[in-house]
Image (tube, rainbow, N blue to C red):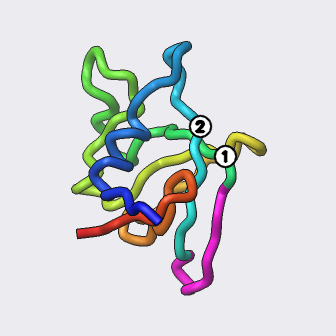
Amino acid sequence: MHRIHIRTVLAEIELPDAQGQPRAFSLGYYKTDGTRGSKPAVRKGGQAGGSTGPAAGSSGFRYNLKATGTVQLVDCKTGTPFALKIILLTHYNGQPILHG
C-alpha cells in the first residue's frame, strides 16, 4: 500500500473543505499505553494551550506543531476535542504514515 509522509498529512489537515470549514478525515494511531486506536471521522480543531492566543488575522486553528508535538482534533461524531501526539499517528484516510 502507498505510504503518505507525515509532512503531507499535516499539510492536508490544515486545508479547508469547499465551504471553508476544517475537512473531515480518518486517523489510526497508537495510544500512550501502546494499544492501537482509530477515529473514522475527525477534523482539525482548537489551538495549543498558551497565553498569547492566535495571531491577529489567523483562524485560531494553526499553531506551532513542532513546539507542541501534538495535533488538536475534534471527533466529528461526538464533538469531543482531543489531542494526539504526531509521532503516534499511524494511518491517514487508510494510508500508512511514513515518519522521517
Mark 1 secondary-structure assignment:
strand
Residue 59's quadrant in the figure? top left
Q: CA distance from mark 2 to mark 1?
A: 6 Å
Q: Is residue 17 left or right of residue 99?
A: right
Frontmost residue, 65 versus 1: 1
Q: Residue furthest right?
A: 78
Q: Is residue 13 left or right of residue 52?
A: right
Residue 14's quadrant in the figure? top left
Q: Is residue 69 left or right of residue 13?
A: left
Q: Is residue 37 magenta?
A: yes
Q: Residue furthest bottom?
A: 34
Instruction: Give the tally of numbered discs.
Output: 2
- Which residues lie in the magenta part? 31-39
Q: At label 2, which amino acid type do we have? A: Ala
Near mark 1 (Cα within 10 A), the count class, few <14, some 14-19 or many ≥20, is some
Frontmost residue, 96 versus 44: 96
Residue pointed to by mark 1: 41
Q: Residue at x 66, y 46 (%)?
A: 41
Question: Which percent across, then down, holds residue 33?
Answer: 57, 85
Q: Are marks 2 and 1 in contact (CB under 8 Å)?
A: yes
Mark 2 or mark 1, earlier in chain: 2
Q: Is residue 65 left or right of residue 24?
A: left
Residue 74's quadrant in the figure? top right
Question: Which percent across, then down, holds residue 19?
Answer: 55, 13
Question: Which percent across, then down, holds residue 88?
Answer: 44, 71
Q: At label 1, which amino acid type do we have? A: Ala
Near mark 2 (Cα within 10 A), the count class, few <14, some 14-19 or many ≥20, is some
Question: Which percent across, then down, holds residue 34?
Answer: 55, 86
Q: In what quadrant of the picture does the C terminus appear?
A: bottom left
Q: Residue at x 39, y 46 (%)?
A: 48
Residue pointed to by mark 2: 24
